[in-house]
Image (spheres, grey):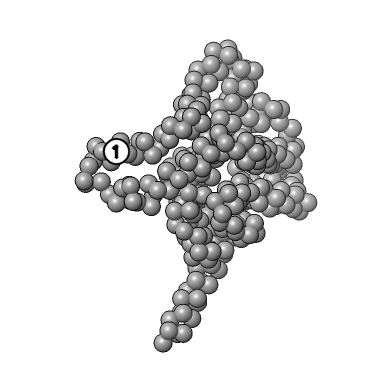
Amino acid sequence: GEVWALIGGLGSRSIFILLLLNIIILPIMTARWWFILRLLEAPVSFFAASLYRCSSNTASYLTPGPHFGGEPLLVFYLRQYHGVAISTATTSVIVDRLIELLASAIVLILCLVYALGNNIIVPGGWQAAVGVFVWLMPFLWLLGALFFGKRPFSGFIALVQRIIGKHSSGLFSNQGVLFAGIVQSERLAESLFRHHPGRFLTVNILTATHWLGIFTEFWVMAALLGVELSLGQLCVVVVVTRLAFYTPLPAAIGVLELALPHVTMVLGLGASFGLSLCLIIRFRDLVFTLAGLGIAIKYLTCLGKINNASKTALK
């Protein structure tokens, strides 16, 4: 009853605000990948890149691990509709995901450090905050390795290749597409970090803008439900929601519905508020998943028509 009272109080104006906010966030989410494509001299229109990203997000959402899974679809779109080389398309996706993964880890851990340090989750926070901060060290090491040209990912794959030897798959061989994409992506990341401060700053601004959009969305959702979250509470809610979507389950089904109400209850906001947030998130995801499916069907259908026309012309 409390949940339906909160949801029922939203109204059409609130739903319009939430949809408009997410429509704005989608191109912000796409901007970094679009910028990386331009750096690789594979320009794609910003509108097309946004549609591709929406379709890719749908594939990721419906497969285990909702933040990853749609990357091959991005490579497919770039190759089929823009003639981008597979290695270049793969590199753009790997670099974008690498930066996103590093940024997500840093932001989420810093949010936890802030929340623990201010005793928002548990008392005696700074001891716990120091423990959480230790988990940040591997990501700082990874950034440092890329900055100094160590190339940890390709080095790891080369080590695996030496161990496996002649039985290694062609996918990971020196001539393999994936291996070449990883090597090229690390070179681009190293170039951004060391030799192009302007480009590196642009990538960071785009990443920070995306995260600002995420925090803004959650604050607006809470405000429309009649709750004004403090910075610490907002950090905890965002962290729990994002971590739920990193679990290896399609759409994080069940995990979000269990974790978010529990956390909002611990924060003193009530479990009904957390469950109401879950319902809004699921409604948003349903809308954009249907949109992404429609985009995917459109492009795959167009590709079939193009192939049929080509066969007819050859005959």
Task: Decide: is 104 above or below 58.
Answer: above
Please indicate whether residue 126 sits to the left or right of residue 90 in the image. Answer: right
In this rendering, the answer to whether 260 lies above or below 185 is above
The residue beneath circle 1 is 160
| Residue 122, quarter of the rendered image | top right
Percent position of residue 105, x then y: 53, 32
- Residue depicted at 51% across the width and 37% down the height: 190
Q: Which residue reaches farthest right? A: 13
Q: Nearer the viewer, residue 224 or 58?
A: 58
Q: Looking at the picture, which amino acid does disc 1 mark? A: Val
Q: Quadrant of the C terminus?
A: bottom left
Determine if residue 280 is in view. Answer: yes
Count residues near mark 1 (Cα–Cα under 10 Å), then give few for <14, some for 14-19, many for 20+. few
At x 44% / y 57%, what residue is drawn? Answer: 86
- Does 185 sit left or right of 283 as displayed? left
The residue under the point 29% across, 51% down is 170
**Depth check: 56 or 151 in front?**
151
Q: Position of residue 55 (x, y in %)?
A: 55, 57
**Residue at position x 62%, y 22% from top?**
114
